[in-house]
Image (cartoon, helix red, strand yellow):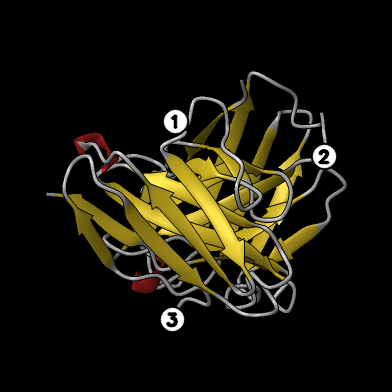
Amino acid sequence: QVRLQESGPGLVKPSQTLSLTCTVSGGSINSGYYFWTWIRQPAGKGLEWIGRIYISGSTNYNPSLKSRVIISIDTSRNQFSLKLNSVTAADTAVYYCAKGTDYARIDPWGQGILVTVSS
Amino acid sequence: QSLLTQPPSASETPGQRVTISCSGSSSNIGRNYVFWYQQLPGTAPKLLIYRNTQRPSGVPDRFSGSKSGTSASLAISGLRSEDEADYYCAAWDDSLSGAVFGGGTKLTVL
């Protein structure tokens, strides 16, 4: 069973870039027709799909975040990453990485990492 | 505001049946599969229903999904205290070329 683990700074200053990495274990990030996905959840609020990447490098992003987001993949390290620039307090959330298959099927999820945007 | 609309809360007593609705549009639920996720307090969401009606292995048959037109529903029968959680519907949106989630429904087992 594939497992995912998010890592990165838990505190980012406003206007800076949030950078997170997701490490995939228990299987190759190259195998199968999967979309490696990022989702976030502000405290006490709902889920927001950020975007996804296929092993070819092809990406889809949430239009509301598209101008600030880059998702990349490193198959040699079995990792994929999220960069969100020009962050504000509104970007404070738990960020989840996950494996996506057909459309909105997202399974499994990482445990999540809290990122706080504050000076 | 979410493109998929769910009631913010639902409640029922143990042993009873509860239904959670999810309303979308022709660009998401109307054209694509619906998925349901369960988020227990303090944990990551877990896939509960996929492709409108299918249960992953390990999900009890007390959980069932349905879809009609641009709406979908999640039904939970024989409610247990451990079913108390937030439930989210999701679907791909062709206009956005991205996945969209409902706002979530907090289920309370009284």
Residue at position x 71%, y 29% from top?
A78
* Distance from the alpha carbon under mark 3 to that under mark 2: 31 Å
| Other residues around mark 3 within 10 Å, as few (<14) / some (14–19) / many (≥20) | few
- Disc 1 secondary structure class: loop
Residue A12 seen from this side: no
Q: Is residue B33 above or below residue A21?
A: below
Left or right: A20, with A1 as reference point: left
B105, A27: nearer the viewer: B105
Q: For residue A42, what is the image quadrant? A: bottom left
| Other residues around mark 1 within 10 Å, as few (<14) / some (14–19) / many (≥20) | few
Is there a contact, CB below 8 Å, between mark 3 and mark 2? no
Closer to the eye: label 1 or 3: 1
**Residue topped by disc 3:** B1
Chain letter of the residue carrying label 3: B
**Residue topped by disc 1:** B60
* Distance from the alpha carbon under mark 1 to that under mark 3: 32 Å
Q: Is residue A53 above or below residue A6?
A: below
Residue at position x 56%, y 56% from top?
B66
Left or right: B15, with A95 as reference point: left
**Residue topped by disc 2:** A33
